[in-house]
Image (cartoon, coloured by chain):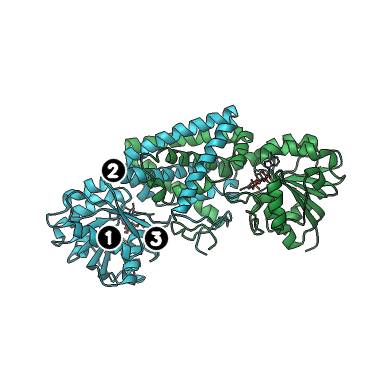
Chain colours: A green, B cyan
Amino acid sequence: MSAVYERVALIGLGLIAGSMSLAIRRAGLAGEVVGTARSPETRAVAAEIGLCDRIVDTATEAVAGADLVVLAVPVGAMGAVAAEIGPYLAPGATVTDVGSVKKSVIEAVGPHIPEGVHFVPGHPLAGTEHSGPRSGFAELFDNRWCLLVPVPGTEPEAVARLRALWEGIGAHVEEMDAEHHDLVLAVTSHAPHLIAYTMVGVADDLRRVTDSEVIKYSAAGFRDFTRIAASDPTMWRDVFLTNKEATLEILGRFTEELFALQRAIRTGDGEQLFDYFTRTRAIRRGIIEAGQDTDAPDFGRGHGKT
Amino acid sequence: MSAVYERVALIGLGLIAGSMSLAIRRAGLAGEVVGTARSPETRAVAAEIGLCDRIVDTATEAVAGADLVVLAVPVGAMGAVAAEIGPYLAPGATVTDVGSVKKSVIEAVGPHIPEGVHFVPGHPLAGTEHSGPRSGFAELFDNRWCLLVPVPGTEPEAVARLRALWEGIGAHVEEMDAEHHDLVLAVTSHAPHLIAYTMVGVADDLRRVTDSEVIKYSAAGFRDFTRIAASDPTMWRDVFLTNKEATLEILGRFTEELFALQRAIRTGDGEQLFDYFTRTRAIRRGIIEAGQDTDAPDFGRGHGKT
Ligand SMILES: NC(=O)c1ccc[n+]([C@@H]2O[C@H](COP(=O)([O-])OP(=O)(O)OC[C@H]3O[C@@H](n4cnc5c(N)ncnc54)[C@H](OP(=O)(O)O)[C@@H]3O)[C@@H](O)[C@H]2O)c1
Ligand SMILES: NC(=O)c1ccc[n+]([C@@H]2O[C@H](COP(=O)([O-])OP(=O)(O)OC[C@H]3O[C@@H](n4cnc5c(N)ncnc54)[C@H](OP(=O)(O)O)[C@@H]3O)[C@@H](O)[C@H]2O)c1
């Protein structure tokens, strides 16, 4: 494939940026991938494992001469990074981000983007519970969605070029507006993560009561929750603080429903439980038909490729 | 391996019984495996795919001459099945069950077990979200726990023999009392399932608001919940109705914690969120160290062996 950008600058070298670098380089989609991270440790690891073509010490250095700049830091850090690099962005360059929340990132980053630079926010719906410079892999985005959330007035060419990059590394691209993005993600990702964190926290509290049997006998259900709840604390703190409204709205609805089901258990209303559980099955079928998961049995344990 | 039982009778031919039959026959642990199920359809499928050595029409026929009888029906149906077969059980035979709840099964089944017949309740911690006679596979119990919950006064030989069967089909066996079993499982399985069902139900309600984007963009987190929430409605209705007390106790604690985290989000208390999320990571490490899951990245999608 021919290069889509001359020089891609990755700010932050964790799971997402690392995977992007490996995928972009594998597909030959950029003349050069330059990367930087906050800590000397991360930069040293990235250099050691050859994560990018070039690792530099500062974000301002990284963006010099780059025609694509990718902000791949926690959502709460996007504004500060944008303020730092704003004055150094090349005219005609595109700035994008990969943050899990879009409204607050647009509010935080937008004001620092100078005239003549394009800002095309994005969010790849792909990830694992791992993080850091060693966690990336080139296949992360294969067949996953990447949502682009262009702000009104963005030049269509800038959006099309970014779309070509994401498609080149295996993703399917769709556009939507920020408000809608944040609501959909609150349902499909943010609220479920908080719920999983909560349930695992409860189990941890009960460890004294149940000895360590909660861990020992960890069954399907809880085991999936623990994987979700092993995700990076900084990233998720920022997600909840910045997608506050939509997340609280969904959690409010969740609590209402949970109370109704708890009441059905308490009063022994088996019909209500049965009907509810039957309805939720249909959603699963939809997801399998949409190709977002497989129907293969989980064998009660395996989650890896092996 | 030499046979542990002369004739094993499976009452119910779903995921668990089907997997047991395949595994027992593969390992040569029984002279004969006889099976029966409530509906002619299930019995026909089981006969067609050769799930057991012999399929019979009634439970009373199945238990005739069996030295092991396995009750593998939903927890709420155990009592009625036990009442039906009680008079036909062979002296010296062992009755066991595979129900996900133990206290209520013991209460429901115990009174129907005649003098001279052993009753050794059990629960294999293995399953998938699939059910029915076609869902079984011989490897289901490999390296999984099977908890035996002998009632006081049970002959140790009867327990040892059942243990040998489970170990022969790949499981690790532990004993515990019924009350403790039901609490541990409420934490590791029952409460997480109700929570997953609830969250998927909320998403379903929101389908009109979000079009079908909740399905389309289903991300890690929610996708795991939908798999859990695709489990059999009858089985889970019965679990919640029969492990009512422990499940409601755990859900009560869950709700308290969730409210605390929601308040932290509302007030912007990032430190509380960060500390909570950091604590839950340790539990995950414990589970991986205990060999109950792998640390391989999930790639945001794959759950099968493939
Ligand atoms: N993980 C997922 O599942 C996933 C999926 C989709 C989108 N996202 C989004 O992608 C972004 C990056 O996530 P990730 O999973 O790649 O995270 P990660 O593996 O934890 O990496 C984060 C990177 O950001 C840097 N960083 C952290 N705090 C910073 C700060 N205050 N200022 C400057 N740099 C900072 C880190 O530098 P050091 O290493 O030097 O600390 C690290 O290089 C986040 O916005 C997240 O919401 C994540
Ligand atoms: N699935 C799991 O993950 C899992 C894990 C551990 C333990 N368990 C326990 O194992 C037991 C069986 O579960 P499963 O997953 O094997 O279920 P399944 O695949 O749905 O099979 C259930 C079997 O029970 C029969 N049955 C249903 N209702 C009955 C009734 N009222 N009277 C008589 N027979 C009835 C069914 O007969 P028809 O096919 O003719 O309707 C079917 O053969 C349950 O007690 C469950 O709690 C399940």
For the point 39% across and 43% down, which residue is it? Answer: B187
The percent coordinates of residue B272 (x first, y second) are 55, 32
**Which residue is identified by label 3?**
B143
The subunit letter for the residue under badge 2 reads B
Mark 2 and mark 1 lie on one chain; the one further toward the N terminus is 1
Examine the image and state in which quarter residue B88 appears: bottom left
In this rendering, does residue A33 appear at all? yes
Tag 1, which secondary structure? helix
**Total label count?**
3
For the N terminus of chain B, the image quarter is: bottom left
For residue B14, above or below residue B260: below
Per the model, the C-alpha gap separating discs 2 and 3 is 24 Å
Compared across the picture, whether B19 is left or right of A251 comes to left
Per the model, the C-alpha gap separating discs 1 and 3 is 14 Å
**Which residue is identified by label 2?**
B179
* Ligand 1 image-quadrant field: top right
User: Looking at the picture, which amino acid does disc 2 mark?
Assistant: Glu
Examine the image and state in which quarter residue B166 appears: bottom left
Tag 2, which secondary structure? helix
The subunit letter for the residue under badge 3 reads B
